[in-house]
């Protein structure tokens, strides 16, 4: 796999603080993958998250995993929330399905290294321009 380009984008204002940036990458000047995310975990470790879509949500009442589009829980029958929020206001734990991802550790490392190198270059150029980066 030959990554021929990576572009970094700032997240929208008000984003989750764990989301540091979006990225897109070009493979062999033939294929583009968008919606990669640079994430900082609670322990400070940074990683690249691959594009995904939610496929299911968990019922807030009985915790049954249910299709993302379901209006009613198939186990307990409660109306599933239109906006998937839990009782504490946090998003209900969703199950995601990756749209694109490496098939092995070597591929994962190549993507991680390429995106993180460009992310650091991008952030350092922002610093030179006067923007803050922590
Ligand atoms: Zn339920």
Image (spheres, helix red, strand yellow):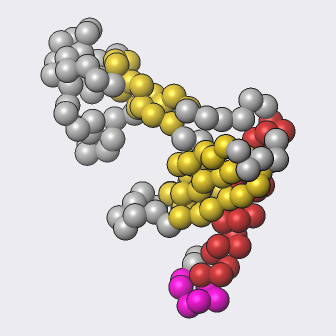
Q: Residue furthest front?
A: 30
The quarter of the image holding the N terminus is: top right
Extent of the magenta region: 127-132
Where does residue 128 sit, x and y in percent of width and height? 64, 89
Front residue of 96 and 99: 99
Residue 80 in sight here: yes
Instruction: Return the x and y of residue 29 as percentages of the image width and height.
Output: 73, 50
Q: Residue at coordinates 42% horizontally, 31% vertically from top-left?
A: 54
Q: Quadrant of the C terminus?
A: bottom right
Find residue 106 and report its image quarter: top right
Front residue of 122 and 40:
122
Q: Residue at x 72, y 58 (%)?
A: 5
The residue lying at 20 percent from left, 20 percent from top is 71
| Number of numbered discs visible in the structure rendering | 0
Give the vertical position of 117 relative to 47 (above or below).
below
Tell me if residue 80 comes above or below residue 32 in the rendering.
above
Judged left or right of residue 117, residue 123 is: left
Q: Is residue 32 magenta?
A: no
For the point 63% across and 75% down, which residue is it?
123
Q: Main SS of the magenta segment?
A: loop
Judge left or right: residue 134 versus residue 64.
right
In the image, is residue 86 above or below residue 125?
above
Q: Position of residue 115 (x, y in %)?
A: 70, 57
Where residue 16 sits in the image (x, y, percent)? Answer: 42, 57
């Amino acid at each position: 796999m030959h990554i021929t380009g990576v572009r970094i984008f700032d997240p929208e204002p008000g984003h989750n603080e764990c989301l540091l940036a979006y990225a897109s990458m070009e493979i062999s000047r033939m294929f583009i993958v968008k919606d990669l995310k640079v994430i900082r975990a609670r322990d400070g470790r940074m990683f690249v998250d691959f594009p995904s879509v939610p496929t299911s949500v968990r019922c807030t009442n009985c915790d049954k995993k249910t299709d993302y589009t379901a209006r009613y829980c198939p186990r307990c029958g409660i109306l599933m929330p239109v906006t998937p929020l839990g009782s504490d206001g946090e998003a209900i734990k969703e199950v995601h399905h990756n749209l694109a991802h490496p098939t092995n550790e070597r591929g994962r490392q190549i993507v991680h290294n390429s995106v993180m190198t460009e992310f650091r270059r991008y952030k350092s150029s922002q610093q030179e321009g006067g923007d803050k980066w922590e």
